[in-house]
Amino acid sequence: MQLKDCLQELSNARGVSGNEGEAQEIIEKYLKQHVHEVKKDVLGNLVGYKKGGGRSRNKPRLFFAAHADEIGLMVTRVEEEGFLRFTTIGGFDPRTLWGQEVTVHGKNRLWGVIGPRPPHLTTTRERKKETRLEHLFIDTGLPPEEVKNSVNTGDHVSINRDFTQMANRRYASGKALDNRAGVAALLLFAEELARFKHVSEVYFVFTAQEEVGARGALTSTCSVEPDLGIAVDVCHGNMPRTRQDETFELGKGPVLGHGPNIHPYIFKRLQNTAEENRLPYMTEPHAGPTPTDARSIQITGEGVASGLVSLPLRYMHTSVEVVNLDDLEVMAKLLSLFTASVDKKTVEELRCYY
């Protein structure tokens, strides 16, 4: 798998929460080469299953989840003049929406732009006010009747942005790298795992609707009933005017989460695996539930021992998110080594760790 090409396909794909089909089709194309079975469920999750080796029964069931959805918009009203008013699906800062190109997913896909009033037509007082969604609209350039025939309230809208490699070719920028970068790392992990012997039954899960409440992780964990589950996601990368304790340097490896949402034994095993194999990593404390699929994995059924491995990412929830490809490769290697180390005894130790 060419990591850059895979990530480019994933980033450019459309997959707003609740409408992840296009992104999941690309994921399935890569995933089915490395697993024994692939299936979809009614919520839109994509699950790949890889058998464990050996003859023993009751093999450990490992669950690795990366969410496939991206933040987007939804049409709330079609104005008489044909302009579209909208709300957000997931967390947007309205300031990042000015001047964006978008695709409206109506009866047909319509290209449009988000246009605010220019400064020439606003007062000094208005320009000092906070940007709000009600100040913004989508313009498709089509006659009002054509817009009304093509677009309904509730239609999804995705942001347009082409993936690109940066001046430093190990850095890449694009939309939806939260969490298509995590998806790419999980696909690379699935490919690399073929080089390792493992006794565990491994489930690669690409979840739906994480950005609107980690819903796909809840239902898919319930379906698989794993012994342990690890969420693969992104965290904040270093950038100007941010605190060092809130961000992580790109190119220094993945970030291991720890705190109440994370089983301490899984955190320790991941940490030991990285150190024993001289893999770079960082750690991030979470005082409560994490804003990832890990929070749903942990509290499914009778409870699942959960972990969190994240990729540093700059400019989260914008169309110019930035990641470092080296971090994805290290994450895939770490997860492969971790999986190879898990056996029946590991599961027993999870239950008596506290």
Image: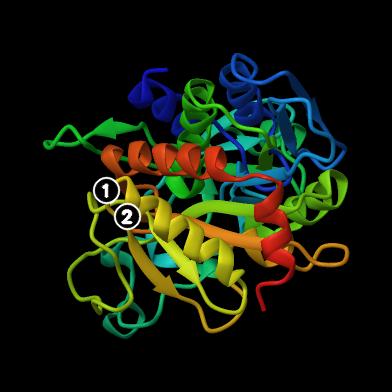
**Residue at point 27%, 39% (across, down):** 326
Q: Residue 285 at what x, y percent from top left?
A: 44, 77
The image shows residue 125, relative to residue 115, as above or below, that is below
Crowd rating for badge 1 (residues with CA inside 10 Å; few <14, some 14–19, many 20+): few
**Residue at point 24%, 76% (across, down):** 242
The image shows residue 279, relative to residue 93, as above or below, that is above
The image shows residue 30, relative to residue 120, as above or below, that is above
Residue bearing the label numbered 2? 275
Q: Of the numbered discs in the image, which one, if any, rests on residue 278?
A: 1
Among the 4 quarters of the image, the one containing residue 206: top right
- Please name the amino acid that badge 2 sits on: Glu
Apparent side of residue 339 relative to residue 330 in the rendered image (left or right): right
- Please name the amino acid that badge 1 sits on: Arg
Crowd rating for badge 2 (residues with CA inside 10 Å; few <14, some 14–19, many 20+): few
Asked whether the beta carbons under mark 1 and mark 2 sit within 8 Å of each other, the answer is: yes
Say which of 55 and 62 sits in front.
55
